[in-house]
């Protein structure tokens, strides 16, 4: 799935706030990756295309890739 840096930033910022307020309680490793991804997305041009690649659904394993450079901005891998 492809999206823009701004659209993904909006979603991930909401998720980060939920994690920080205790609404959701993922493992610390996922919280760290979420925080890092929000920071990286905030530094990109808003219309920069980002590819979200789901490698596995259960448990989740996804990569967030900057399309223009192929750089993996973040990789989230849930625990089984």
Image (cartoon, grey):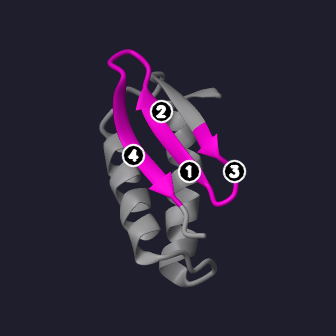
Q: Which residues are magenta?
A: 54-77
Identify the residue under disc 3. Answer: 57
- Relative to residue 43, is residue 68 drawn left or right? right
Q: Percent position (x, y) of residue 8? A: 55, 41
* Cα separation between marks 1 and 3: 6 Å
* Cα separation between marks 4 and 3: 16 Å
Q: Percent position (x, y) of residue 72? A: 36, 35
Whether residue 41 is visible: no
* Cα separation between marks 1 and 4: 11 Å
Residue at figure coordinates x 32%, y 43% from the top left: 40
Identify the residue under disc 4. Answer: 74
Identify the residue under disc 2. Answer: 5
What SS does tag 3 mark? loop
Q: Nearer the viewer, mark 4 or mark 3?
A: 3
Label 4 or label 3, whichever comes before in sequence order: 3
What SS does tag 1 mark? strand
Residue 59, above or below 65 = below
What SS does tag 4 mark? strand
Identify the residue under disc 1. Answer: 61
Tell me if mark 4 has few (under 14), some (14-19) or many (20+) residues whose alpha carbon lies within 10 angstroms of its own.
some
Label 4 or label 2, whichever comes before in sequence order: 2
Residue at figure coordinates x 32%, y 18% from the top left: 69
Q: Given the current orientation, which residue lies at the most extreme bottom position?
A: 22
Tell me if mark 3 has few (under 14), some (14-19) or many (20+) residues whose alpha carbon lies within 10 angstroms of its own.
few
Q: Nearer the viewer, mark 1 or mark 2?
A: 1
Q: Looking at the rendering, which quadrant does residue 62 occupy?
A: top right
Residue 22, above or below 11 = below
* Cα separation between marks 2 and 3: 22 Å
Q: On the rendered image, what quadrant is the N terminus found in? A: top right
What SS does tag 2 mark? helix
Label 1 or label 4, whichever comes before in sequence order: 1
């Amino acid at each position: 799935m492809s999206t823009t840096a701004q659209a993904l930033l909006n979603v991930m910022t909401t998720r980060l706030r939920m994690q920080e307020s205790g609404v959701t309680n993922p493992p610390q490793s996922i919280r760290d990756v979420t925080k890092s991804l929000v920071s990286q997305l905030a530094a990109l041009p808003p219309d920069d295309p980002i590819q979200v690649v789901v490698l596995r659904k259960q448990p989740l394993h996804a990569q967030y890739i900057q399309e223009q450079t192929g750089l993996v901005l973040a990789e989230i891998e849930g625990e089984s």
